[in-house]
């Protein structure tokens, strides 16, 4: 699968958030502020997972043929399982 630039950019922003959190910890910032930023990072990661899974499901469903043993229903179930597992 080819990941588009939007996914890479999302991950780079998340990387920046994580580095900022590490800096906050090193500077002894308040626990509440650190946890707030960690929650924001987790939400960003969850949204990125959703983008990747939804892009992948569209690609997989467009390429269903004899060489792909999975039906469209199985592809959707697998995608849902990936999303549920990630939470």
Image (spheres, helix red, strand yellow):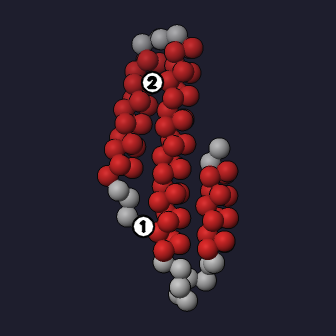
For image coordinates 42% across by 36% down, the residue present is 14
Q: Nearer the viewer, mark 2 or mark 1?
A: 1
Q: Which mark is residue 20?
A: none
In the displayed structure image, the side of residue 60 where residue 13 appears, left or right: left
For image coordinates 49% across by 37% down, the residue present is 44
For disc 2, the marked residue is: 21
Give the CA separation, mark 2 to mark 1.
31 Å
| Along the viewing direction, whichever of 26 and 86 lies nearer the viewer | 86
Q: How many marks?
A: 2
For image coordinates 62% across by 52% down, the residue present is 83
Q: In the rendering, at what x and y percent does residue 72 appear?
A: 61, 74
Q: In the rendering, at what x and y percent does residue 51 appear?
A: 48, 51
In the displayed structure image, the side of residue 85 where residue 56 appears, left or right: left
Quarter the N terminus occupies:
bottom left
Q: Are marks 2 and 1 in contact (CB under 8 Å)?
A: no
Quarter the C terminus occupies:
top right
In the displayed structure image, the side of residue 61 where residue 22 appears, left or right: left
In the depicted structure, whether residue 46 falls above or below residue 62: above
Q: Which mark is residue 1?
A: 1
Q: Residues within 10 Å of mark 1 (few under 14, many from 20)?
A: few
| Along the viewing direction, whichever of 85 and 80 lies nearer the viewer | 80
Q: Tag 1, which secondary structure?
A: loop
In the depicted structure, whether residue 30 falls above or below residue 23: above
In the displayed structure image, the side of residue 4 where residue 76 appears, left or right: right
Q: In the rendering, at what x and y percent does residue 5 appear?
A: 32, 52
Q: In the rendering, at what x and y percent does residue 25 appear?
A: 47, 18
Q: Tag 2, which secondary structure?
A: helix
| Along the viewing direction, whichever of 22 and 85 lies nearer the viewer | 85
Q: Residues within 10 Å of mark 2 (few under 14, many from 20)?
A: many
For image coordinates 54% across by 21% down, the residue present is 36
């Amino acid at each position: 699968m080819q990941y588009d630039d939007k996914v890479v950019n999302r991950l780079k922003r998340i990387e920046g958030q994580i580095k900022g959190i590490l800096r906050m910890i090193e500077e002894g910032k308040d626990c509440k502020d650190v946890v707030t930023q960690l929650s924001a990072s987790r939400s960003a990661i969850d949204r990125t997972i959703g983008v990747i899974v939804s892009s992948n499901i569209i690609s997989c469903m467009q390429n269903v043929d004899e060489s792909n043993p999975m039906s469209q229903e199985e592809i959707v179930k697998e995608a849902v399982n990936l999303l549920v597992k990630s939470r």
